[in-house]
Amino acid sequence: MSERARVTDWLTDWDHLDPNWIEDPFPIWDSIRAAKCPIAHTDRFRGAYLPTRYDDIRAIAYDPEHFSSRQVVVRDNQIVSGGGAPPITSDPPRHRPARMVLLPPFTPQAIDKLTPKARAVCNELIDGFIDEGSCDAAGDYAQHIPVRVIAHMLGIPDSDGDQFRKWIHDILEVGTSDQYVLERGFAEMTEYFAGHIQARRARPGDDLISYLLTAKYPDGQPFKDTHILGTLRLLLVAGIDTTWSSIGASLWHLANAPADRRRLAEEPALVPSAIEEFLRAYAPVTMGRLVAKETHINGCTFKEGEMVMLSFPAANRDPAMFPDADKVIIDRKENRHAAFGLGIHRCIGSNLARMEMTVAVEEFLKRIPEFRLAGDVTWSSGSVRGPRRVPITFG
């Protein structure tokens, strides 16, 4: 693979794989947002737009007629054949039945039943390193919590967690610029879930895979295997990387902000409010849209066939929407952030993510109220941004 050309003008040649973006994207978004045209463009990725203001991102997210979800990742290479992940890659009218079938397992009541499992997972992980006096808050803690919870929901072995993490790294990071790695990851994941589907057909269980096998379209027809496989890929990828990134970013912030950390340790009732602020300030997810029809937003022409990157993290830093947008205020009163997306594709798993984040922070602060950074932090690249290494020491 050839080395990527570095960005010299973020308005006309942006690249979310550039090291400056990966390390610190916030000033980049500020500079674009302050420009005469706050919507950047690049010829990379076969042509792509980058809106940075909340209102523009919201307008695009609510316009599936002009902005299709057939492609939801801005990448160098082409979409993988058969690589759809309904409902997130579905447009109306197919979107609604694919989404509706997933709502019951992710209601607040359903997620409440998973809370004891999440607490047990967190404490088991803490038991493994608390006597060491230090840990990697990302690699030893954050990355394991959603893996184990979603594996429990799907009825698959959480001992396969290393394989899940590899697929996520291949698909969402390396695969953004390497077609071979992308296709290999999709193929391996598809083969894995095909085996579990076959096993559930022979012996159904009380899990999400069995549940999807009984799901039907509005006309009464069962979902096709390609649909089920795509949805399972979505649940695994979206249910893990996004949440572990958010947990890791929350602990990274608390390691950097002793006043916030001590306040939350002393006032645990503030944790839910703090979680909403961490979601706003460190939102991990961007989504792509394919321009289906030429249109205009905020004076910018969006050409058919090009891509748009909906940076919900950039929307969450828009000072026109959030006072003191660049400050992390753990008791912020009004916080209508877009961390879970906007429009018809707003994240189905938001209740699960909130619960996992809340439990992860609560249990960590109960057991380890004092901690600080102990080395360099590394961040992921691609469409999901989060810390991959957060070394901390206790006390």
Image (cartoon, rainbow, N blue to C red):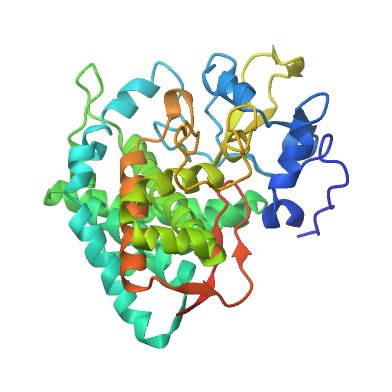
| Count of marks, rendered view | 0
Q: Residue furthest right?
A: 8
Residue 152 at x, y = what percent?
A: 23, 57
| Quarter of image, res 299 | top right
In which quadrant of the rendered view does residue 57 lie? top right
Q: Say which residue appears at 43% left-offset and 17% top-offset.
A: 92
Quarter of the image where the N terminus is located: bottom right
The residue under the point 48% across, 67% down is: 138
User: Residue 74 location, x and y as percent?
Assistant: 64, 39
In the image, 166 versus 187, the foreground residue is 166
- Taking depth in this image into account, of 94 and 333 the one nearest to the observer is 333
In the image, residue 60 sits, relative to residue 317, either above or below, namely above
Q: What residue do we see at 21% from left, 31% from top?
A: 215
Is any atom of residue 230 visible in this view?
Answer: yes
In-image side of 204 versus 234 (left or right): left
Q: Relative to residue 230, is residue 65 depicted above or below? A: above
| Quadrant (top left/top right/bottom left/bottom right) for the C terminus | bottom left
Does residue 319 sit above or below 255 in this rendering?
above
* 177 sits to left or right of 244: right
Instruction: Name the residue rendered at 79%, 38% in the picture.
Output: 31
Q: Answer above or below: position of 97 versus 158.
A: above
Looking at the picture, how far across and down is residue 316, in whole percent? 57, 36
Residue 346 lies in what quarter of the image? top left
